[in-house]
Amino acid sequence: MADRIDGKRLANGLIQGLTKEVEQFKASHNVVPGLAVVLVGHDPASQVYVSSKVKRAKEAGLNSIEHYLSEDCSQSELDGVIEQLNSNPNVHGILVQLPLPSHLCEKKVIESIAPEKDVDGFHPQNVGRLGTGEASLTPCTPLGCMLMLRQHFGDCLSGLSGKHAVVIGRSNIVGKPMAQLLLQANCTVTVVHSRTQNIESLCQQADILIAAVGQPEMVKSSWVKTGAVVIDVGINAISRDGKRKLVGDVEFDSVSGVASALSPVPGGVGPMTIACLMQNTLTAAKNQINLPTNK
Ligand code: NDP
């Protein structure tokens, strides 16, 4: 049976360490790192994500600032909130929960967040820096996956060097930055997507398989090489035996019999994503007062 890569436990450890760092930061600089979260509308999944982020921010000792805007809020109203947060010195990180209602322009919103406060790592400046290997605010989900891999392969990245990593999915928020981070860790990276031919045989070649697709249990045991390490990013709500259930993009039970390690859903990448958001907020606060960071 595969080892379980326990994201929940790892995230708790990360938050504990961050809490101490935040305390030291406050004591040394008299500054409380501040995370502003903006939620537009009443999407139930977004409400759950935002309340988890706010809860974790408070646990870590960050100053949590929340803005809840109505579903029909105008682009200029949202732009105004971001402008105000950009110029507020008590706010070090800004997160606008996506997706936005369809009348609002996500691209404009992402580009209007000050790059140094862009704790989601979606601003083109941060995307570019990640691509060129410069220090940047890195998207939280791929960052969380990398921390899970580092924990599995040993903290130094040499454990990942030379491994063949296959990433399923090429979104801007998960697949592409994931591929960049794996490249930086000296993996050989293959990215597959909905137009890829022979996807199963490409996945079979992976030492490390990252599934970020949004298709419930798409990855079967026949797709996975014996001994591969599998990280399941997917979060899919399904109905089974009359009950609502969350499953990943990987068929957990069958793949457990083939992989050497596998992250579960829930309790895998999800908690790590939130913990990395807190880490990015502290990093952003350090950058804004020009302190060295651990990156
Ligand atoms: P997107 O829908 O933006 O991207 C999905 C990607 O998967 C696309 O590149 C798409 O290809 C590819 N894809 C879709 N269907 C197939 C298929 N049948 N075969 C091969 N490739 C396919 O999703 P996200 O990247 O935003 O998210 C992916 C999953 O991760 C979702 O389940 C989401 O809920 C979850 N997620 C989890 C997070 C966490 O914290 N755990 C955070 C963010 C996302 P193409 O580009 O060709 O369309």
Image (tube, rainbow, N blue to C red):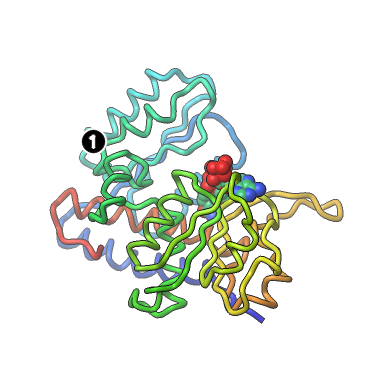
| Quadrant the N terminus occupies | bottom right
Decide which of 251, 81 is in the foreground and name it: 251
- Quarter holding residue 251: bottom right
- Residue 89, given in percent of the width and then of the height, sits at 20, 40
Say what secondary structure mark 1 lies in: loop
Seen in the picture, residue 293 relative to 68 is either above or below; the reply is below
Residue 47 showing in the rendered view: no
Q: Residue furthest front?
A: 197
- Residue 208, given in percent of the width and then of the height, sits at 51, 69
Seen in the picture, residue 158 relative to 104 is either above or below; the reply is below
| Quadrant the C terminus occupies | bottom left
Decide which of 66, 74 is in the foreground and name it: 74
Left or right of 82? Residue 165 is right
Decide which of 212, 74 is in the foreground and name it: 212
Residue 45 showing in the rendered view: yes
Who's the residue at 70% across and 49% down the image? 237
Seen in the picture, residue 32 relative to 229 is either above or below; the reply is above
Decide which of 102, 274 is in the foreground and name it: 102
- Residue 162, given in percent of the width and then of the height, sits at 39, 73
Ligand 1 is within 8 Å of the C-beta of the residue at disc 1: no
Which residue in the protein does label 1 denote?
A: 88
